[in-house]
Amino acid sequence: MNNESLTLDAYPVEVEFPDIRPYAEGNCGIPYVFTFDSGVAGPHVMVNALTHGNEVCGAITVKGLLDAGVKPRRGRVTFAFANVDAYACFDPARPDASRFVDQDFNRVWTSAVLDDASRDSSELRRARAMRPVIDTVDLLLDLHSMHEKSRPLIVSGPLDKGIALARALGAPADVIVDEGHPEGRRMRDYADFGDPASARNALLIECGQHWETSAVTVARDSAARFLLNAGVIDAQDVPTGWLQPLPATQRVVRVTEPVVANSMDFRFAGPYTGLETFMEAGTVIGWCDGEPVVTPYPNCVLVMPSLRQLRPGVTVVRLGQLEA
């Protein structure tokens, strides 16, 4: 089990963690994965939850889609609970501890890692089990939440096609354009999702703080919009109350660099939770091994700062520029 920071105040758990054991069998030969084919031409669209075991808003949303009997009118739809072993470990007394069991499920998504039989972990076994269905997905929505209480955001990846899909969705209002993490590749960047020449596409949505009620609202809205935008369902198929008003505008923040902890000696200069903007270059935002960490350019945006998973080699914040 990964270590959690015990020095930070815990956020309250506002939502109930649903029992997903009734969904263990799945319907496609992969536990906790459900695929429905309309028999009509269209894309294969996937809504994925529980990439991290303590990010419950996605699980509530996928359970809601299954319980509501949402099926595709065109194409094929897959609903999945991913890291179910980590989810089963959730303890309200240590709510950050169940992010993963052995390693981050969202850092293993390269063929080299997945094909390496010498490597084993709970997360790799689950990724390998899910890989056959993910290899057939045209459009992936990966539902996440954040360590800190911040506005929700779309992680579009680095490619123009990801930005275009985020804009087509229209919400949340903040679109983060990034290359991923030094630790390993995310599911949303896996294979053709990360190929500019491929029509296959993916978005990751950070719906809010892990256990706040509003994160569930964002996750439901995002899933409904994603399925509607893909054309696999119609408006009358959306569960009542899931769609929310669109924001007036969206803005795009392009991540230029990660700030990676070299050791456990890292601290921020303020109680940052995300999307703080610093007007002047050279502003001190923290200290790493006693050395200041400064903003490299004007109007620098902090993307998902957090020390809750602090350890050497972990990205503690990413720095981004607003795009015109």
Image: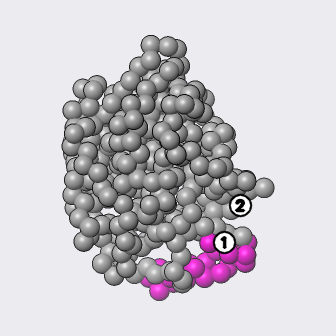
Q: Are marks 1 and 2 in contact (CB under 8 Å)?
A: yes
Q: Dot 1 corresponds to which residue? A: 277
Residue 311 placement, left or right of 194: left
**The residue stretch that appears in magenta:** 276-298
Q: Quadrant of the C terminus?
A: bottom right
Amino acid identity at mark 2: Leu
Residue nearest the observer in this picture, 45 or 214: 214
Say left or right for 78 vs 129. right
The quadrant of the rendering that contains the N terminus is: bottom left
CA distance separating discs 1 and 2 = 9 Å
Query: Residue 265: image x %, image y %?
Result: 40, 81
- Which label sits on residue 322? 2
Which residue: 31% across, 34% down? Answer: 33
Residue shown at 36% from the left, 54% from the top: 56
Q: Residue at x 47, y 57 (%)?
A: 215
25 vs 208: above or below: above
Q: Is residue 116 visible?
A: no
> Type of residue at label 1?
Thr
Q: Is residue 133 above or below residue 202?
A: above
Q: Is residue 191 above or below residue 142?
A: above
- Residue at image location 47% in from the left, 86% down from the top: 290
How many numbered marks does the figure carry? 2
Q: Is residue 124 left or right of residue 76?
A: left
Residue 123 part of the magenta segment = no
- Residue ranking furthest to the front: 240
